Amino acid sequence: MKILPREFYERKTPEVARGLLGKLLLHRDDEGETGGIIVETEAYLGKGDPASRASKKKTKLNEIMWSRGGLAFIYMVHGKWLFNITTEKPGIPGAVLIRAIEPTIGIELMIKRRQVQNILELTSGPGKLTEAMKITKELHGVDLTLPESPLIVCEIGLKNLEICSSHRIGVKKDLQRKLRFFVCGNPYISKQKPFKRAL
DNA sequence: ATCTCGATTGGCT
DNA sequence: GCCAATCGAGATG
């Protein structure tokens, strides 16, 4: 189980979004350990991507998108915390939204936090997974490449995943490019509908 | 201090 | 499929 290094994140955002599928996301604090396999992501680019916060002017909230890759980028939408990871080299904006994981670690603790019994409802959406894993503004800016961080992403040797893509979900003005990536047919993704093979 | 908006969710038709 | 509750940040006064 190896932590993904900075170089993994400092690449083209859509490549990072695809590459994160099948990796293990892990959170730990005094309450316990929770985590799961990333099964759905979305890429958010810089200028020219109307859906991206980096297409607007820099603020305290979004400036982290211009920083180095591998940092937690967290903000609230519709009363839910959303968790992203920064991408690209310093100066170039980009981030990947983690939309769903397949729960594998600390399932009992996640059930307690989410107040749902159905495992399929535990982490199958961007706001659901942050609640289950207790990811909030507190973790904004955390470096995911450091072993001592409360939040890390690991390589666990999953190979030959069948990857599908679609347009991004819930986005008002989306690009023509398909920037949502997910593991085909995985029951833990947020929406099953869009079902096209990536490339 | 107040208003508006949104990369959502869950409940209802 | 539609819709409204959600709540913090940013903008505005």
Image (cartoon, coloured by chain):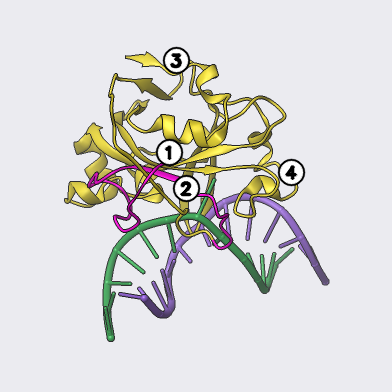
Chain colours: A yellow, B green, C purple
Looking at the image, which residue sits at the far left? A117
Identify the chain of the residue marked 3, using the numbered disc in the image.
A
Which mark, by number, is residue A86? none
Which element is circle 4 on?
loop
Q: Is residue A173 magenta?
A: yes
Q: Residue at x 24, y 51 (%)?
A: A121
The one nearer the camera, A94 or C6, is A94
Name the residue beneath numbered marker 4: A58
Q: Residue at x 44, y 14 (%)?
A: A147
Residue B13: percent from left, percent from top: 28, 86
Name the residue beneath numbered marker 3: A148
Label 4 or label 1, whichever comes before in sequence order: 4
**Which of the 4 image quarters holds residue A191?**
bottom left
Identify the chain of the residue marked 1, using the numbered disc in the image.
A
Nearer the observer: mark 3 or 4; the answer is: 4
Going by the numbered disc 3, the residue's amino acid type is Glu
Q: Is residue C5 left or right of residue A93?
A: left
Q: Is residue A122 magenta?
A: no
Q: Reply above or below: A168 against B3.
A: above
Label 1 or label 2, whichever comes before in sequence order: 2
Going by the numbered disc 1, the residue's amino acid type is Ile
Going by the numbered disc 4, the residue's amino acid type is Lys
**Cβ atoms under marks 2 and 4 closer than 8 Å:** no
Please tell me how crowded label 1 is: few (under 14), some (14-19), or many (20+) other residues with Cα within 10 Å.
Answer: many
Q: Which residues are magenta?
A: A172-199
How many angstroms separate mark 3 from mark 4 (CA)? Answer: 29 Å
Report whether mark 2 lies on the same chain as mark 4: yes
Most prominent secondary structure in the magenta stretch? loop
Label 2 or label 4, whichever comes before in sequence order: 4
Label 3 or label 4, whichever comes before in sequence order: 4
How many angstroms separate mark 1 from mark 3 (CA)? Answer: 16 Å
